[in-house]
Image (cartoon, helix red, strand yellow):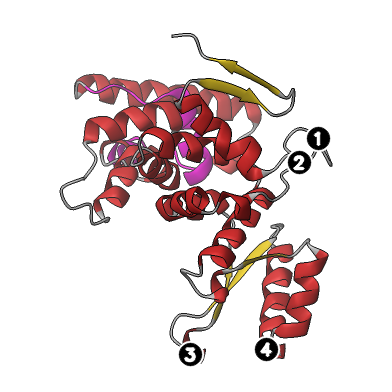
Amino acid sequence: MAENLNIIERANKVLTFRKYIREECRKKGMDYPSDEKLAEYINETSSFDVAECMKAYEGKLGVFRDPFDDLIKEIGKISWGDNKPSEELIRDYASKNGCDINGFLKMWNINSYNGIEKDTLLATLKLDDTKLVALWNKFIEESALYGADSYIYDLKDKNDIQFIYSNFPKEKIAEITRILRNATLHGEEVRFIQWFNLNGKDDEKIRVKKDINSIIIAYWGEIFERVMLYPSAYSFSTNLYAEGDGSTYFDDVFFPMIAKEIGYNINGDKGTIEKIEK
């Protein structure tokens, strides 16, 4: 067994194993795995069986699994209609950003917007989660397009905590407590939750919201329209430059993108405006 070898014996065993794997790959006209991958294979399997290793390598099993193949499979599960991304585009994304399906979907959804819609979205996504939650909740409140159960609560906000204890039924508070306890046991943090109610009591569920960006991206078309219709409703504080600086979402995040579209650079921090020379 590999774990019973001393340091010298193990080093010699690894070198010999690596040599045999390379010889097998040369016979089959294959590129051979990197030293790092072979080390990972040995650490995971505690095995120096050349045939088993080659079987895993050729079959892209275990540590030799190609994460790009997994990304392709996940993307293939989605109903794209006539708008399915090409493998070339997916490969280009993966080469630059890795094989994270959520990251790919964010990129794809962002690129589904154009012009000023995309510019204002990108500017918005630079805000931290707290401000993005404030934007979402303002959208829910102002638009009335969705129920109040779509509201996202911040478990670090005293007002939200007070509202939860004053308005949530005991069983829901108990569920939140259970979620927090479980997260703590796994070394995780739960900050944002949503008490989601789809079709009555049987569908009520506390949802943990970890990825605030995704919900903003998904609903951006509607959020954009509401901000354009009622900009004054979205003039909530952002503290964009410094605590208590008076900056607001519409004035210092959203509107500068519109100004740029019509040829002006606005800097709310410096209080300046300049015409863009063409």
Front-most of 155 and 158?
A: 158
SS at badge 2: loop
Q: Residues within 10 Å of mark 4 (few under 14, many from 20)?
A: few
Q: Earlier in the sequence, mark 4 or mark 3?
A: 4
- The reply to whether discs 4 and 3 touch (Cβ–Cβ < 8 Å) is no
- For the magenta stretch, what is the residue range? 30-55
Residue 57 located left or right of residue 47: left
Q: x, y (%) of residue 84? A: 21, 45
Which residue is the site of mark 1?
Answer: 242
Q: Viewer-nearest of labels 1 and 4?
A: 1
Q: Three-letter amino acid code at disc 2?
A: Asn
Q: CA distance from mark 4 to mark 3?
A: 13 Å
Q: Three-letter amino acid code at disc 1?
A: Ala
Which residue is the site of mark 2?
Answer: 239
SS at badge 3: helix
Q: Earlier in the sequence, mark 2 or mark 4?
A: 4
